[in-house]
Image (cartoon, rainbow, N blue to C red):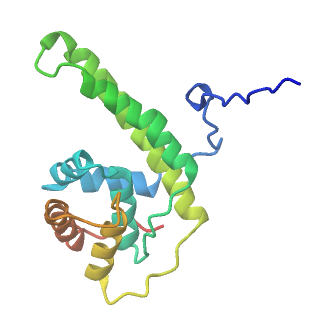
Amino acid sequence: MSVRSATIPDLSTVPLELPADLEPENPLWRFALTFWTLPDVQDSCLALQNQGWSVTRILCAAWLALSGRAFTGVEDATVTEWRDRVTGALRSARKSLPSRTENYQKLRTGIAGLELEAEQIELALSWRTLMTNNPEQADMQGRDTLITTNLVAAAPTSSVDDRASALLNTLATTLADFPKGDHQP
């Protein structure tokens, strides 16, 4: 009697299944573009990313807070798979190139552009999930509390260290002063 071993497929070679009606130009993306340009936001988000945080999760949490909705931290598997297989792979490739050498600058810039496009698709996937699983209005004691609670829910682990707390406080202060506009779900 022969025993066949099951072959586990290499998922990295299987194309991702993305919705045909994905909307890259959505309110979450427009919010992200505006928020990113505000003082200290980019530096804070990138510092958190270097600590293992997902900027997409931070942006979703922030956007929902401004809309008076709670961020649970739960994501659709397609979002995390896209982040791991596409956005993360591009970021890793870009960071692997020497940054102080002029010879690779054009390639680094090209990959950075692709990384931004991948982040836009990641946010579109997130937005689609947020619209499908539209969270209820938060039952919190005010906007500032909701902002902080949502940002903490975006953490990669259940605890937030002092370095991350300081960066989150910077983001929370910026969000508290964020102008009204197209950030409603």
Q: Residue at x 52, y 42 (%)?
A: 81
Q: Position of residue 54 (x, y in %)?
A: 34, 51
Q: Residue furthest top?
A: 103
88 left or right of 103?
A: right
Where the N terminus falls, by quadrant? Answer: top right
Q: Relative to residue 179, is residue 111 depicted above or below?
A: above
Q: Relative to residue 1, is residue 64 depicted above or below?
A: below
**Where is residue 141, by image quadrant?**
bottom left
122 left or right of 111?
A: right
Q: Position of residue 97 (x, y in %)?
A: 24, 20
Q: Is residue 103 visible?
A: yes
Q: Residue at x 37, y 29 (%)?
A: 90
Q: Is residue 181 visible?
A: no
Q: Relative to residue 45, is residue 167 depicted above or below?
A: below
Q: Residue furthest right?
A: 1
81 left or right of 2?
A: left
Q: Residue furthest front?
A: 1
Q: Position of residue 50 (x, y in %)?
A: 23, 45
Q: Residue furthest left?
A: 100
